Amino acid sequence: MDLTARVEEALETIRPYLIADGGNVAIEEITSDNIVKVKLLGNCGSCKMSFMTMKAGIEQAIIKAVPEIKGVEAVDLAPQV
């Protein structure tokens, strides 16, 4: 199974929770240095808790399932100050 398919499989473990809250996540890119870039969709893109969802949920699910991934970044997430 290729890297993208393995990351997608990891996302499937958390996706039901995102969908239940009116959101979702999509893979935008996996860089050559194994950084996954995702786009938060629906309510996940505008929720005040999206940074926590990103770090505690999405990133942890991916890194746990695909250890060669070095990090996860949301392409549409506003930086936290």
Image (cartoon, rainbow, N blue to C red):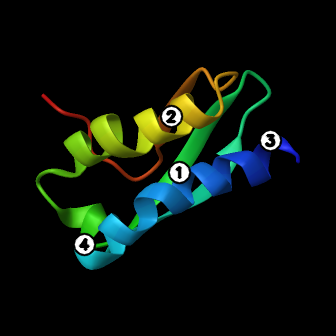
Quarter location, residue 20: bottom left
Identify the residue shown where x is 88% and y is 48%. Answer: 1
The percent position of residue 62, horizontal first and vertical second, equals 54, 39
Q: Are marks 2 and 4 in contact (CB under 8 Å)?
A: no
Identify the residue shown where x is 40% and y is 53%. Answer: 76
Identify the residue shown where x is 77% and y is 54%. Answer: 5
Residue identifier under label 3: 3
Identify the residue shown where x is 80% and y is 41%. Answer: 3
Residue identifier under label 4: 43
| In the image, residue 25 above or below residue 57 | below
* Along the line of sight, the residue nearer the viewer: 40 or 22: 22
The percent position of residue 34, horizontal first and vertical second, equals 70, 27
**What amino acid type is highlighted by mark number 4?**
Asn
CA neighbours of label 3 inside 10 A, class few (<14), some (14 to 19), many (20+): few
CA neighbours of label 2 inside 10 A, class few (<14), some (14 to 19), many (20+): some
Disc 4, SS: helix
Residue identifier under label 1: 38
Q: Earlier in the sequence, mark 3 or mark 4?
A: 3
**What amino acid type is highlighted by mark number 2?**
Val
* Separation of residues labelled 3 and 4 (CA atoms): 27 Å
Mark carried by residue 72: 2
Disc 1, SS: strand
* Separation of residues labelled 1 and 2 (CA atoms): 7 Å
Q: From the viewer's perspective, is the residue at label 3 or at label 2 nearer?
A: 3
Disc 3, SS: helix
Q: Are marks 1 and 2 in contact (CB under 8 Å)?
A: yes
Is residue 51 rendered to the left or right of residue 57?
A: left
* Separation of residues labelled 2 and 4 (CA atoms): 19 Å
Disc 2, SS: strand
